[in-house]
Amino acid sequence: MRYDALLCDADDTLFDFAAAEKNAFAEACAQTGFEATPAMLEQYSDINRALWQKLEQGEITQRVLRVRRFEQFLEAIGRRDSAQEMADRYAEALSRQSILLPGALEALRSWSALVPVVIVTNGISRIQHGRMDRSELRPYIRGMVVSEEVGTAKPDPRMIELGMQAAGVTDRSRVLMLGDSLSSDIAAAAHAHVDACWLNPEGKPNSRGLPVAYEIRSLGEVEALLKGGRNRDE
């Protein structure tokens, strides 16, 4: 076996976050007293994405982020509803969304038969644990490292190091980090000096010039990497 542990991102790697976000946003809007539109969802998503980027850069805390995104959204659409209440409604709705990407369950089942799999995710504890506990993935993971619980977020290498502890592995050369985000997953792997596997189904360019041990188009390619059946430069 080439690796002794697999650290894996959650959203857009195993979970279909776009679908989950759409459902939770619609529910939160309805409970707040208005109907969500595609334009509203796009507006909220842009605000949310920008704030998560600030979190990755250490410019904002997760506690502030979870409400500020709704403060900015409600201000943008000209409503004076409570951002805190909308944030709470959204979090509750999102915690019930466990929509998987195609092939995620089968892939995780095969990985866990080979090595311990630990989820390393930037997210809100209530939401991430709620989604995982409701999903079919739960029996196949060794543990979870959630940014809100540990007080830091990817790309901080401490997220990787805590994942290694959860997996019971100390040798960095025997750890693989799998994720879809260059700015969080792949950068965290680089900072922690572990191999990175970039899930890049659309073939986007590596705009940050980060070291990537493997670039894959589908989750079905990961099992061979764990076993050492593919060279790093292939």
Image (spheres, rainbow, N blue to C red):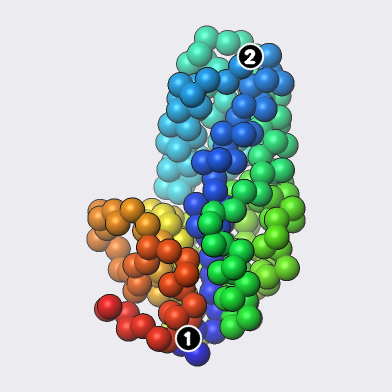
**Is any part of residue 125 visible from this angle?**
no
Residue 15 in percent (x, y) is at 57, 52
Residue 92 in percent (x, y) is at 72, 37
Residue 113 in percent (x, y) is at 63, 81
Task: Give the residue number, with chain letter if any, for mark 2.
Answer: 34
Task: Give the residue number, with chain letter if any, for mark 1.
Answer: 227
Residue 208 in percent (x, y) is at 27, 56
What residue do we see at 30% from left, 68% from top? 211
223 over 93 or under it: above or below: below
Q: Find numbered disc 1 in the image and state the secondary structure of the residue it sits on.
A: helix
Q: How many marks?
A: 2
In the rendered view of the protein, which quadrant contains the C terminus? bottom left
Alpha carbon separation for disc pair 2 and 1: 51 Å
> Amino acid type of disc 2?
Phe
Which comes before the other along the chain, label 2 or label 1? 2
231 and 150: which one is in front?
231
> Amino acid type of disc 1?
Lys
What residue do we see at 50% from left, 13% from top? 77
Circles 2 and 1, Cβ within 8 Å, touching? The answer is no
